[in-house]
């Protein structure tokens, strides 16, 4: 049993493939289920369960939350085979390395997934403006009322991307940038998952801070939207961990090991995320979903093929987490009407 | 009085009170406890002070109140017009309209607003047609904003107003109006002096429900990007658990929603109390034939209303069968794949819905029918409190109940050592509590229609109380009970606001499924499940309508 903010289109095939794998290897029938909940909700429920969890595994979100859970003794040490752990590098990215596994061994990354932006090419064509490449392109005056975003208080991907902009431009200019984005915003959605949905449907032209696989799901569902990960986009390793007090710790560990095996990684790669080890690359027969994913994310096959830039510092972000939230609430959420007029 | 029967009566009475105290009073106390304490558990008013000094929260409160009033206004205008037309006049297809105008009420949460967005959104059918045909550059913003919320609530809730008025009007003895007319009070005068005062209680209770419903709905505003309202703030603050301070503010706002609901009920108390049935006879109303022009005006008005009202259904229907539908007036690729996925591939949504709602209705009957009997036929102490509690349940937002349950029942139970929140029975329980008032009211209004003298007569010829209940009372009131039960089923199967907070993996009911599909971005699957749910509800409502006629209104009043 998983509790996860990762959407069904990634969890369901992973679980199904794992069940098949278990049947083949050990001749055991594993019953799996996933409880979908946004990162904050999932985290909150785990805390509320107080060590008597209803799920075995927590998958997805930011590694900082996993560290917080470790502190509260709500996670179990993973004790994965050394070869599996060693296949994953400690970190990726410069100048600020992104940790891909917990040195203490409570959580481990599963895939690499950028938080970028989405847009609907048809609307951009109609508005007569070039397709966006970087964050700054969202501030185009013709996009007024046409940008969708989710408040950083509601969405961890949005919070992280707010931090990317604040750390890129510094506080003063960063907030000014975010206010201008607020002025262009047509909707603050309730959840980050809604951002690609409303863009896919054509309700809004572009969306801010979207995990790649979420956008890819809409592409798989037949919508025309596109995804771009700007150079400074943050990448999450989608950590996974076993909850302390889990009822099926063995099956949980087996699942995690499976996800890190080639078979597990291949399942994930078909869904618009990237492998966590340099061993594999997103690749498939022409016309396969894997190839569609490569095309969708701009031709990239692995993050280990290239220099990865990361300017997001999680320590800074975690220290001022609440301060950024309340400043957003005061300067952007509450002042939205004024921002729309001002910019 | 023989002792054994008295003992069993007392026992039954105690069981009902225990149910009410454990599942209604205790969770509410828990949520108030949370709202009035700090992190360390000490008593404090800081939380409320924070609310009332925060300009954003104050604006949310103010906007919520205004939106509620606006919804009362719009639903009144439409609801009263429809009710008057349906009950006083004869025109073509009157019976069909009578059924169809009730249908918007059974639009499940989320489905209504999604459907409207598919048709009236920025990339909805209407805007796309305008842009394609008339070269409109920027889409017209029908939906995103308070105007969209008001539209959705108005269409969803006007039937509630219609039903309340219909119910009240059909209780007005026409002889009273005739008498007034005979004494020279005509037209407006008669309406003002006779009809209005007699229908006020029905109207007020309808208005109260519209107000509280709008006030407490968080799903509609959220989909439309309106977050500066109270209910969405409660939901959003609670759904982010990371920041404990914001989380606590969510609980505080929920507590505030409960307090406000109580205040509203108190303010309207004299109108919504159960006992005040001005006249209990459902009278046959003579309908007047409308002239040819007016007749078609009436048909035209109702058709236009239905045209708008059925936009959501049409929208979700298209979304359910259309693949990758975006920026075209209608879907381009059609498929039944989504229906297969949500029914045959994962039947749990439909099965859970039927099972849990069924159990909830059974619980409602076991607790609610005796409650109606206590309220209508006995003079036991605590009756008024029981009555007030029933009305209160009707008024408390589902969101608050869901939150209250998750806070209140998260401790391991004595014998089994599992918290109630980990047992699936909590879903039927919370549904039963939420729908209990319908059962109580449905049963009570029928019970009050059975004259006590009939029961007394039977008793005089030697029947025991039990025999009287079985042979006289039940045959006379079963219809009302059945209608109440069906209505409880119908509304349970649509419930999302409380259950969203309590659902664990494997227990998903249809509205939760719609919600998770929507969250996961699978709008088509959400729509397919929505269509199935609407169909199931439409059938139940049709049965209710056949059995009960206009009497469904009495359930709200």
Image (cartoon, coloured by chain):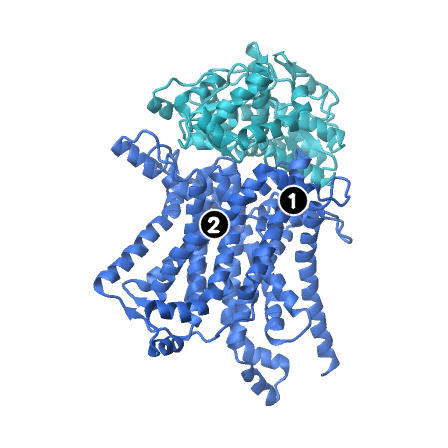
Chain colours: A cyan, B blue
Query: Residue pushed farthest left?
Result: B292
Instruction: Determine whether B379 is above or below A43 in the image.
Output: below
Q: Relative to the observer, which residue lies in front, B185 or B69?
A: B185
Q: In percent of the image, x 29 and y 70: which residue is there?
A: B288
Q: Secondary structure at mark 2?
A: loop
Q: In percent of the image, x 38 and y 56: which residue is there?
A: B78
Instruction: Determine whether B281 is above or below B433 in the image.
Output: below
Q: Chain of mark 1?
A: B
- Give the mark nearest the N terminus, 1 or 2: 2
A41 left or right of A271 in image:
right
From the image, which quarter does the C terminus of chain A lie in? top left
| Residue B149 makes an appearance in the image | yes
A132 left or right of B14 in image:
left
From the image, which quarter does the N terminus of chain A lie in? top right
B557 left or right of A144 in image:
right
Q: In percent of the image, x 61 and y 43: which residue is there?
A: B505
Q: Chain of mark 2?
A: B
Q: Relative to the observer, which residue lies in front, B7 or B371?
A: B371
Find residue A108 and report its horizontal and vertical position in percent: 67, 24
- Marks 2 and 1: in contact by CB < 8 Å? no
Disc 2 crowd rating (10 Å Cα; few below 14, some 14-19, many 20+) is many
Instruction: Determine whether A237 is above or below B234 in the image.
Output: above
Disc 1 crowd rating (10 Å Cα; few below 14, some 14-19, many 20+) is many
Q: Relative to the observer, which residue lies in front, A105 or A280?
A: A105
Q: Residue B469 is drawn in which quadrant?
A: bottom right
* Tag shown at residue B252: 1
Mark 1 or mark 2: which is in front? 1
* Tag shown at residue A212: none
Q: Secondary structure at mark 1?
A: helix
What separation in Å lies between label 1 and label 2 (alpha carbons)?
27 Å
**Residue beneath disc 2:** B108
């Amino acid at each position: 049993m998983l509790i996860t903010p990762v959407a069904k289109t990634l969890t369901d095939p992973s679980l199904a493939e794992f069940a098949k794998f278990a049947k083949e290897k050990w001749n055991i029938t594993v019953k799996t289920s996933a409880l979908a909940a946004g990162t904050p909700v999932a985290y909150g429920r785990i805390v509320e369960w107080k060590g008597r969890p209803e799920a075995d595994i927590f998958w997805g979100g930011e590694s900082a939350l996993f560290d917080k859970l470790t502190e509260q003794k709500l996670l179990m040490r993973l004790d994965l085979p050394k070869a599996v752990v060693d296949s994953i590098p400690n970190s990726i990215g410069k100048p600020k390395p992104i940790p891909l596994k917990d040195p203490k061994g409570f959580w481990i990354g599963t895939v690499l997934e950028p938080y970028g932006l989405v847009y609907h090419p048809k609307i951009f064509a109609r508005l007569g403006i070039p397709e966006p490449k970087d964050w700054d392109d969202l501030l185009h005056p013709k996009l007024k009322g046409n940008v969708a975003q989710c408040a950083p208080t509601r969405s961890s991907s949005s919070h992280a991307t707010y931090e990317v902009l604040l750390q890129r431009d510094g506080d003063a200019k960063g907030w000014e940038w975010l206010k201008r984005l607020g002025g262009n915003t047509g909707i603050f959605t309730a959840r980050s998952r809604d951002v690609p949905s409303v863009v896919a449907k054509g309700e809004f032209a572009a969306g801010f801070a979207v995990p790649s696989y979420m956008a890819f799901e809409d592409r798989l569902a037949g919508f025309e939207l596109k995804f771009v990960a700007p150079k400074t986009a943050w990448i999450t390793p989608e950590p996974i961990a076993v909850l302390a007090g889990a009822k099926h710790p063995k099956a949980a560990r087996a699942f995690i090991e499976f996800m890190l095996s080639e078979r597990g990684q291949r399942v994930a790669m078909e869904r618009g995320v990237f492998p966590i080890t340099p061993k594999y690359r997103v690749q498939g027969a022409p016309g396969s979903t894997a190839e569609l994913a490569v095309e969708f994310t701009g031709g990239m096959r692995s993050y280990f093929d290239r220099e990865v830039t990361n300017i997001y510092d999680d320590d800074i972000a975690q220290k001022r987490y609440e301060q950024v939230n309340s400043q957003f609430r005061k300067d952007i959420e509450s002042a939205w009407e004024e921002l729309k007029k001002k910019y | 009085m023989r002792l054994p029967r008295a003992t069993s009566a007392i026992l039954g009475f105690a069981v009902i009170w225990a149910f009410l105290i454990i599942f209604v009073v205790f969770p509410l106390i828990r949520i108030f406890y949370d709202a009035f304490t700090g992190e360390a558990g000490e008593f404090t008013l800081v939380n409320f002070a924070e609310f009332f000094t925060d300009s954003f929260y104050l604006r949310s409160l103010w906007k919520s109140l205004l939106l509620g009033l606006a919804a009362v206004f719009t639903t009144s205008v439409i609801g009263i017009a429809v009710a008057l037309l349906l009950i006083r006049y004869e025109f073509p297809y009157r019976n069909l309209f009578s059924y169809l105008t009730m249908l918007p009420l059974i639009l499940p949460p989320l489905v209504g607003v999604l459907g409207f967005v598919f048709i009236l959104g920025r990339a909805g059918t209407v805007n796309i047609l305008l842009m394609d045909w008339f070269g409109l550059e920027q889409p017209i913003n029908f939906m995103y904003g308070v105007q969209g919320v008001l539209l959705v609530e108005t269409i969803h809730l006007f039937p509630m107003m219609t039903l309340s008025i219909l119910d009240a009007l059909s209780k007005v003895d026409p002889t009273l109006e005739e008498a007034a007319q005979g004494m020279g009070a005509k037209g407006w005068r008669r309406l003002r002096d006779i009809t209005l005062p007699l229908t006020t209680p029905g109207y007020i209770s309808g208005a109260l429900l519209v107000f509280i419903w709008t006030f407490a709905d968080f799903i509609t505003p959220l989909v439309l990007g309106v977050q500066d309202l109270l209910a969405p703030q409660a939901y959003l603050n609670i759904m982010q658990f990371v920041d404990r301070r914001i989380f606590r503010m969510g609980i505080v706002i929920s507590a505030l929603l409960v307090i406000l609901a109580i205040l509203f009920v108190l303010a309207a108390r004299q109108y919504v109390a159960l006992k005040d049935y001005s006249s209990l006879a459902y009278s046959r109303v003579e309908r007047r034939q409308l002239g040819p022009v007016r007749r078609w005006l009436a048909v035209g008005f109702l058709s236009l209303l239905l045209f708008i009202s059925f936009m959501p259904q049409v929208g979700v229907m298209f979304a359910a069968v259309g693949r990758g539908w975006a920026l075209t007036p209608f879907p381009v690729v059609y498929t039944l794949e989504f229906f297969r996925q949500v029914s045959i591939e994962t039947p749990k949504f439909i099965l859970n819905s039927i099972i849990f709602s069924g159990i909830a209705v059974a619980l409602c009957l076991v607790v609610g029918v005796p409650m109606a009997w206590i309220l209508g036929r006995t003079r036991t102490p605590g009756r008024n409190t029981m009555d007030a509690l029933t009305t209160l349940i009707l008024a408390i937002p589902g969101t608050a109940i869901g939150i209250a349950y998750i806070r209140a029942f998260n401790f391991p139970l004595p014998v089994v050592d599992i918290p109630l929140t980990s047992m699936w029975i909590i879903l039927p329980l919370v549904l039963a509590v939420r729908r209990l008032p319908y059962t109580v009211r449905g049963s009570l209004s029928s019970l009050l229609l059975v004259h006590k003298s009939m029961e007394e007569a039977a008793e005089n010829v030697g029947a025991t109380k039990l025999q009287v209940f079985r042979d006289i009372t039940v045959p006379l009131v079963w219809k009302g009970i059945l209608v109440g039960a069906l209505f409880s089923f119908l509304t349970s199967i649509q419930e999302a606001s409380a259950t969203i907070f309590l659902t664990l993996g494997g227990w998903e009911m249809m509205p939760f499924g719609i919600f998770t599909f929507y969250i996961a971005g699978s709008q088509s699957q959400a729509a397919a499940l929505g269509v199935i749910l609407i169909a199931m509800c439409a059938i139940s409502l049709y049965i209710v309508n056949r059995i009960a006629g206009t009497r469904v209104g009495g359930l709200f009043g």
